[in-house]
């Protein structure tokens, strides 16, 4: 009888731990995972964009944000403005620092409803947070910064390189966790490079967990050879381009002459 | 069906550049212009970065102007002697023009000066050509015989040294005249970022007094060499020529240039001039709209015309 007591104590402690875990699910019960199902996109001659699916498991009941971005860098664009109060033309340049060339954001709910401003800023989630994160010059004040940042977003969205969506992530509870999945279109305008997929789990307006995956987009075959040649052997590339154009011009001329077109 | 463009870093529906090339080639064969004024903005509109659009355009003009020059040469419409002097002037003008851009940019408001000059020049040339061709056509209809009066400019040109006969064009000029005019167009072309065919063709007609059909062939011959130089320099220094895009464009433009030449030979000089005037005026109106209407996007990539 004596030696049975410790076992009873252990089971009581174990039961209490389970009870406490049930009461306070804590930071995470299921580890957040992220997988890009098309993580190596090869650009060949007939490439016209692709799709990227992101899937994984999260805790049940959390909200999710999925961010696909390129590395941050510098961008320089031409600004159009009115000259002499009448004519629209390029007036100066706009410089942007710490800005990704590609930024896609998907969330289960409206970002403003599920995240605090501090958390949005910390993880650069949403256009407003991105605006606060990016440096824009030359701008005289915050109002002007907002104006040009919104023009920048318009420009990027028109090139299919920036987008924000809500409610496109499908979520399904399974085995005490939560499966999520989203299939996104990968635009052909997105340049080759390494892209980062960040999945962010949110509870009580705070980020509770993040997981990442990479997507590599690279040129392949003849496309890669031509791009490399244009970049590294410009003189030879130029001579070949000219020779091909001259050859094509003469060939078509000869064909038309034979068929009587020019006479 | 789409093809990916390795330098432009985007893909494009194949029929688009082939169709655009066909239209531009047709204009080349008909009027002896390169067509950059039309093609570069259209390529930008279809998502090609401005620097790549401008450089690749030069590459395809090499093909279209080779095709057009060949077709015109076969029917005896290329004045090589005149073309070489104009070309010499054009090279000099290009060098001066590049320096002029630097000075204009340093002075500020360069874009404003360039755009306004461009619009005014195209507008004046277009209206003058249109009115003059229309009145000539009317005169010929009623059987009036046109008596050419020698203008003061004509008398001045004849007084210059190094007079030489240009057999193919049937005119006599000092070699300084085509060199100077080529230089002038070269300067303006470099400043405005266009090939200059639109300015060269009227100058050849009104100042050099060349026959319209010889003008078209000779202008294409000159454009061919200018674009060879530009294509090489763009490939070598800026790496912005997209060979794949150029091939798609030239498939259309080489055929278009041949068709344009055939059509051109069926038209009279005055008809060609009036058609060119209409296109010049249409381009002018398009630029005026672009300048006065608020663009949908206030930001753009750098480069282009």
Image: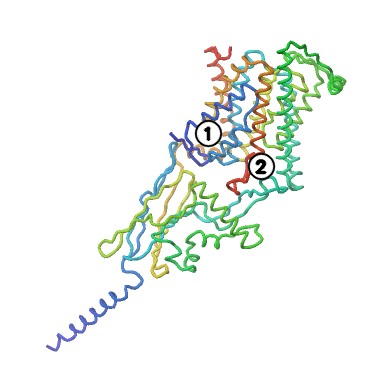
Letter of the chain that mark 1 sits on in the rendering: B
- Taking A73 as reference, is B238 above or below it? above
Q: Which subunit holds the residue at mark 2?
A: B
Left or right of residue B76: residue A260: left
Tags 1 and 2 both on a single chain: yes
Of pointers 1 and 2, the one earlier in the residue sequence: 1
- Please state the horizontal and vertical placement of residue B287, each as a whole percent of the image: 65, 37
- Secondary structure at badge 2 equals helix
Circle 2 packing at 10 Å, graded few (<14), some (14-19), many (20+), is some
> Which quadrant would residue B261 be assigned to in this image?
top right
Number of marks: 2
Where residue A46 is drawn, which disc sits there? none
Q: Residue at x 54, y 51 (%)?
A: A154
Quarter of the image for residue B63 reads top right
Numbered mark located on residue B291 in the image: 2
Question: In percent of the image, x 29 and y 75: which residue is there?
Answer: A21
Badge 1, how many Cα within 10 Å: few under 14, some, many 20+? Answer: many
Res. B245 mark: 1
In the image, farthest residue toward the front: B142
Nearest the viewer among A42 and B211 is B211
Q: In this rendering, would B110 be left or right of A160?
A: right
Residue A62 position, x and y percent, is 35, 65
Q: Give the quarter of the figure containing the C terminus of chain A.
A: top right
Residue A124 versus residue B295 in the image, above or below:
below
Q: Give coordinates of residue A46: x percent, y percent.
A: 43, 36
- Distance from disc 1 to disc 2, alpha carbons, whole Å, reads 28 Å
């Amino acid at each position: 009888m004596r030696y049975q007591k410790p076992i009873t104590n252990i089971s009581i402690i174990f039961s209490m731990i389970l009870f406490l875990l049930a009461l306070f699910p804590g930071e995470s019960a299921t580890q957040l995972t992220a997988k890009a199902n098309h993580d190596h996109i090869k650009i060949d001659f007939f490439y016209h964009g692709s799709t990227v699916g992101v899937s994984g498991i999260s805790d049940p009941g959390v909200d999710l944000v999925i961010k696909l971005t390129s590395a941050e860098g510098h961008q320089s664009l031409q600004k159009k403005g009115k000259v002499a109060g009448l004519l629209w033309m390029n007036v100066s340049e706009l410089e942007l620092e710490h800005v990704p060339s590609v930024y896609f954001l998907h969330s289960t709910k409206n970002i403003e409803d599920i995240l605090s401003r501090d958390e949005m800023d910390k993880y650069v989630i949403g256009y407003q947070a991105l605006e606060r994160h990016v440096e824009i010059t030359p701008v005289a004040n915050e109002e002007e910064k907002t104006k040009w940042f919104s023009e920048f977003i318009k420009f990027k969205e028109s090139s299919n390189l920036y987008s924000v969506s809500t409610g496109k992530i499908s979520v399904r509870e399974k085995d005490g966790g939560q499966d999520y999945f989203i299939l996104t279109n990968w635009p052909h305008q997105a340049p080759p490079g390494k892209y980062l997929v960040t999945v962010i789990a949110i509870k009580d307006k705070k980020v509770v967990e993040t997981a990442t995956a990479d997507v590599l987009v690279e040129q392949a075959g003849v496309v890669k050879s031509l791009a490399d040649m244009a970049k590294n052997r410009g003189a030879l590339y130029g001579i070949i381009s000219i020779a091909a154009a001259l050859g094509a011009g003469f060939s078509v001329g000869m064909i038309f002459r034979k068929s009587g077109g020019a006479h | 069906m789409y093809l990916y463009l390795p330098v432009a870093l985007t893909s494009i529906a194949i029929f688009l550049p082939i169709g655009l090339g066909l239209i531009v080639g047709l204009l080349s064969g008909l009027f002896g212009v390169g067509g950059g004024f039309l093609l570069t903005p259209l390529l930008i509109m279809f998502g090609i970065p401005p620097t790549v659009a401008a450089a690749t355009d030069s590459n395809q003009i090499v093909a279209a102007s080779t095709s057009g020059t060949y077709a015109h040469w076969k029917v005896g419409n290329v004045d090589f002697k005149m073309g070489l002097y104009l070309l010499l002037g054009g090279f000099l003008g290009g060098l001066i023009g590049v320096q002029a851009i630097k000075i204009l940019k340093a002075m500020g408001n360069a874009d404003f000066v360039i755009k306004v000059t461009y619009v005014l020049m195209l507008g004046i040339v277009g209206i003058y050509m249109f009115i003059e061709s229309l009145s000539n056509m009317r005169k010929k209809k009623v059987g009036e015989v046109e008596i050419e009066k020698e203008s003061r400019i004509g008398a001045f040109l004849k007084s210059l040294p190094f007079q030489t006969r240009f057999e193919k064009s049937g005119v006599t000029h000092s070699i300084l005249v085509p060199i100077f005019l080529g230089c002038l167009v070269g300067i303006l072309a470099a400043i405005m970022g266009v090939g200059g065919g639109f300015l060269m063709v009227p100058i050849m007609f009104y100042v050099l007094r060349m026959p319209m059909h010889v003008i078209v062939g000779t202008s294409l011959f000159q454009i061919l060499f200018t674009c060879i130089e530009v294509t090489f320099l763009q490939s070598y220094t800026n790496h912005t020529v997209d060979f794949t895009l150029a091939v798609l464009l030239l498939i259309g433009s080489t055929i278009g240039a041949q068709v344009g030449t055939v059509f051109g030979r069926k038209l009279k000089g005055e008809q060609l001039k009036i058609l060119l005037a209409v296109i010049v005026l249409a381009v002018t109106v398009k630029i005026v709209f672009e300048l006065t209407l608020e663009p949908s996007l206030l930001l753009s990539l750098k480069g282009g015309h």
